Each structure stands twice: as structure tokens, then as C-alpha cells.
Image (cartoon, grey):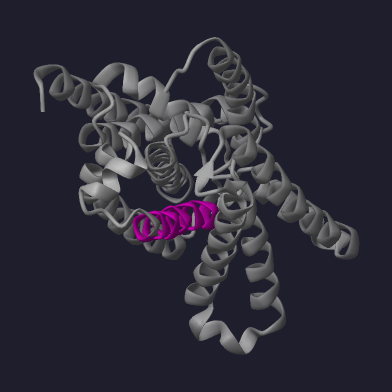
Amino acid sequence: MTTKQVLGFSFLFIALVGVAWMSIYIGPTTSLDPMILREIRLPRVAIGILVGLSLATAGATLQGLLRNPLADPYVIGTSSGASLGALIAFQVRHFFPEFAAFSTGIFYFIIFACAFLATMSAYYIARSEKQVSIINLLLSGVIVSTFCGALIFLFFTLQHEESFSVFIFLMGNMTEGNWTLIGTSAVIIGICMIFSIMAAKNLNIISLGEEKAKHLGIDVEKFKLMLFALNSLMVAAAVAISGTIGFVGLVVPHITRLIVGPNHKTLIPCSALAGAILVLLADDAARVIAKPLEIPVGIIMSMVGAPFFLWLLKRRQKTKYF
């Protein structure tokens, strides 16, 4: 790592610690009751960190893998698939209580399966003659997200008495506070991040072109399948505790790349830290903008991410930016 990269990583780590400490004491109430801090604020900060780490890591690896600066779990439909999976998992746990002993495992498996299926569907719809164009990927992501959204709204129509709580969750809400789910997601995200960092060398090679990667001995299609599964698992672990929070994986890697450069060995861990910071700040804003009411953090991120996406799209029309 260069001096600039070390300084960038150190700055992001210190900033994350500071923002996390601040987030513990921010909320619609100024009470510092230990129970509020322990049972509400601390789990919420833990969820924010985990969600930011996972979504930013997924975004950084997808952009390198597809050599597409617009690639993001939210844009290509992974998050929508995971949200549909969470909805199905809720219903399975509700209608089949006999699986209670295995409920956590089943819950995560269903979310992962739907996220992976959505990702692969978007990829293969966009793929043409072994190439994936940016426009095709965006369109296929819209198709997959729309289909998943239609199924979700069908649930709202058929199960309207339960729809409000599900709707709030799917909009991005970090108030779950279930330590079992938080711990499970932490283990999954930690393992996936380790494998993502281990894949950084191959990502650097693939960024030079798939043909060069094949000549250097990388099985590109097998590597893509592995990373798609890895990213789907990370997104599933995030959605399980927070619902759908979009654009983190789009915004963060671009900003981080300006700080530490394009080397994925540094870009991935730095993006993870920056993602955690961004999600915590968005959650802080969600708590205080309309207090005592709270805005779902997914809305805050969409308000930030959508204009950034448009700016990035316009910039690509003027230059071959990556």
C-alpha cells in the first residue's frame, strides 16, 4: 500500500469510529438512559455498520467484475430479489411454525436464493455474445426489479392487514434490534468480505479485459459465478436486518476510488469503511429531520443516490469514465 492509501484507510477508519460513537447518542429523544442506548441505539449502529460494509463491498466488486461503473446491487436487481425473498421468508415463518427451530437458517437461505436468482437473471438477460453492455444491464435490472416489485405489491393487495409493517421494513429500516439476526449477518458479511478481498487480484486483472484474464489463466465465467453468489449472500445478509437500502454500492466506490485509487486490494476495504460511514450518517439524518417521527433510511439514501446516478450517467455520455 502506498502512503496515500494508508492515510486514506486510516482516515476512513477513524471517521467510522467517530460517526459510530456520535450515532449512539443521536435520536428523537435526548435521554441517555442505559436501556435506550443498549437496546435501541447500539443495535441500530451495529446494523448500520454491517449494512454499509456489505453493500459498499458488493458495489465495488460488481463494478470491477463487470467493468461497469453503474453496476450496483440495487441497480441490477439483487436488492429487489432479496426483498422479495425476505417477504417470502416472513410468510414461511408465519404459516409453518413447525420450522421454528430452523427459522433463522431458512430465513437467510430464502433471501439469498431470491437475490442470487435475480442477479443471474439480470446478467443473462443483458448478456449478448459474451458481452454485457451498460445499457442492457440497466434495462435488465429494471425488468427484474419491476417483476420483483410487482410480486411484492401483489402481497400488499392480498395481505393488506399486514402490509404496513412489511412496507416500512422494505423501505429500509434499521430498528429491528434482533441480536440473533445481527450476529448471523455479521458472520456472513465478515466471511464474504474476506473472500472479496482475496479476489481483489483477479478483479484487477479482469478490469484490464476478459481476454487478457483468460490468457493469464483465470476462468472468467466461473469467477463471475462465484462473485455473484458472494455478493448475493452479502446483500441477503444486509436485507435480512435492514430491508432495502439502495445506491450505497453505487455512490461509495466512486468516491473511494478518488481517494485511494482503483486497486481493488485497497479499494474494497476502504469502500467498506466509507459505506458504513455513509449509512450511519443517513440513519442519523433519518432520526432527526422530522423528529419525533423517523424517515426510513432507504428514502434518505435514494434521495442521495438517485441524483448521483443521473450525474454519473450524464458524465458517461461525455467521456469513457470508469
Tell whether 57 sits left or right of 239. left
Residue 147 lies within the magenta run? no
In front of the other: 278 or 224: 224
Q: Is residue 31 visible?
A: no
Tell whether 211 sits left or right of 40. left
In front of the other: 212 or 33: 212
Residue under the image location 72 percent in, 81 percent down: 95
User: Which picture quadrant has residue 90?
Assistant: bottom right
Q: If the image is split into quadrants, where does the C terminus sit?
A: top left
Residue under the image location 13 percent in, 24 percent down: 6
Q: If the image is split into quadrants, where does the N terminus sit?
A: top left
Residue 300 x %, y %: 61, 28
User: Which picture quadrant has residue 286?
Assistant: top right
In the rendered structure, which segment of residues is drawn in magenta?
222-241
Residue 245 x %, y %: 57, 40
Residue furthest to the top? 318
Residue 268 x %, y %: 29, 37
Q: Is residue 309 visible?
A: yes
Residue 197 versus residue 91 in the image, above or below: above
In front of the other: 209 or 118: 209
Residue 239 lies within the magenta run? yes
Which SS does the magenta portion mostly show? helix
In front of the other: 1 or 69: 69
Residue furthest to the bottom? 98
User: Which picture quadrant has residue 308?
Assistant: top right
Residue 179 versus residue 146 in the image, above or below: below
Residue 35 versus residue 64 in the image, above or below: below
